[in-house]
């Protein structure tokens, strides 16, 4: 157990809908990362937050947004969902925002039908 | 754009045999990570390689990093069935205010009795 908690573990929703994925980082970690894993694209970095502020942005679609709250948990919002958004979404956390090991949560499996 | 390539992508080997997985990356980076993923599960950190010439070993796995050649290897010694999993290498971008891991495609390892 990495100490990173993601909820829910599984999510099934219809196209066009909006969902929110939640992540609680390891105790003491200030940085949170979101990654998407799909068969087509592999593992892709989406976005990073550090102490509430956005630090790095990857291939995150405009339909997706994220934030990190004062208690350091983070949420990834996915809207206008498409079939192609079906994937495993991982959250990871680290103590500092760069040059350090990140620990991954168990992931949220999103299925869009 | 940073590209990370692993080979082979699929590896089927017999118990007791040795083999090496290769990870090449396209731009300068001093940080390389190896992760293990069981089907549908999270990413488990195996090794963090932080400098040229770094070598780390844990059990039957040994990882090395050659930053000049932009190459990392994961060597498996006397494979056992429990090592069956997908192995990813990931490279961190050059130091910036944030961090993003770029992952290879993964090597799916199957160890047969």
Image: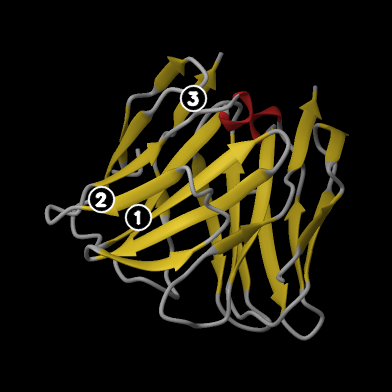
* Residue contact between numbered discs 1 and 2, judged by CB atoms under 8 Å: yes
Q: Is residue A28 above or below residue B83?
A: below
* Residue contact between numbered discs 1 and 3, judged by CB atoms under 8 Å: no
Chain ID, mark 3: A
Q: Which residue sits at x=70%, y=74%?
A: B65
Q: Which residue sits at x=82%, y=80%?
A: B69
Tell whether A26 sits left or right of A85.
left
Dots 1 and 3 on the same chain: yes
Which residue is disc 2 drawn over? A26
Q: Nearer the viewer, mark 3 or mark 2?
A: 3
Front one among B32 and A15? A15
Q: Which residue sits at x=33%, y=25%?
A: A8
Q: Earlier in the sequence, mark 3 or mark 2?
A: 2
Chain ID, mark 2: A
Q: Which residue sits at x=78%, y=74%?
A: B26
Q: Is residue B41 above or below residue B113?
A: below
Which residue is disc 1 drawn over? A93
Q: Is residue B63 above or below residue A103?
A: below
Cα–Cα span, label 1 and label 2: 7 Å
Which residue is disc 3 drawn over? A110
Dots 3 and 2 on the same chain: yes
Helix, strand or loop under label 3: strand
Query: Whole-percent x and y of residue B111?
Result: 78, 30
Q: How many residues crowd around disc 3 within 10 Å: few (fewer than 14), some, or many (20 or more)?
A: many
Helix, strand or loop under label 1: strand
Q: How many residues crowd around disc 2 within 10 Å: few (fewer than 14), some, or many (20 or more)?
A: many
Tell whether A93 sits left or right of B6.
left
Q: How many residues crowd around disc 1 within 10 Å: few (fewer than 14), some, or many (20 or more)?
A: many
């Amino acid at each position: 157990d990495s100490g990173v908690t993601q909820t829910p573990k599984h999510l099934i929703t219809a196209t066009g809908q909006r969902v929110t994925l939640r992540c609680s980082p390891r105790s003491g970690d200030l940085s949170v990362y979101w990654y998407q894993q799909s068969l087509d694209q592999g593992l892709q970095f989406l976005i990073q937050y550090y102490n509430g502020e956005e630090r790095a942005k990857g291939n995150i679609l405009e339909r997706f947004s994220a934030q990190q709250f004062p208690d350091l948990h983070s949420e990834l919002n996915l809207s206008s969902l498409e079939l192609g958004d079906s994937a495993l979404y991982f959250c990871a956390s680290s103590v500092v925002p760069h040059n350090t090991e990140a620990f991954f949560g168990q992931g949220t499996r999103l299925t869009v039908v | 754009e940073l590209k990370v390539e692993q080979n082979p992508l699929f590896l089927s080997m017999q118990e007791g045999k040795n083999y090496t997985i290769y990870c090449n990356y396209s731009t300068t980076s001093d940080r390389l990570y190896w992760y293990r993923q069981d089907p549908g599960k999270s990413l488990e950190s195996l090794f963090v390689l932080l400098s040229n010439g770094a070598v780390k070993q844990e059990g039957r796995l040994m990882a090395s990093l050659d930053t000049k050649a932009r190459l990392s290897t994961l060597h498996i010694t006397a494979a056992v069935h429990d090592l069956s999993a997908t192995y990813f290498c990931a490279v961190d971008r050059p130091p910036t205010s944030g961090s993003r891991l770029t992952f290879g495609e993964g090597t799916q390892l199957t160890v047969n009795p």
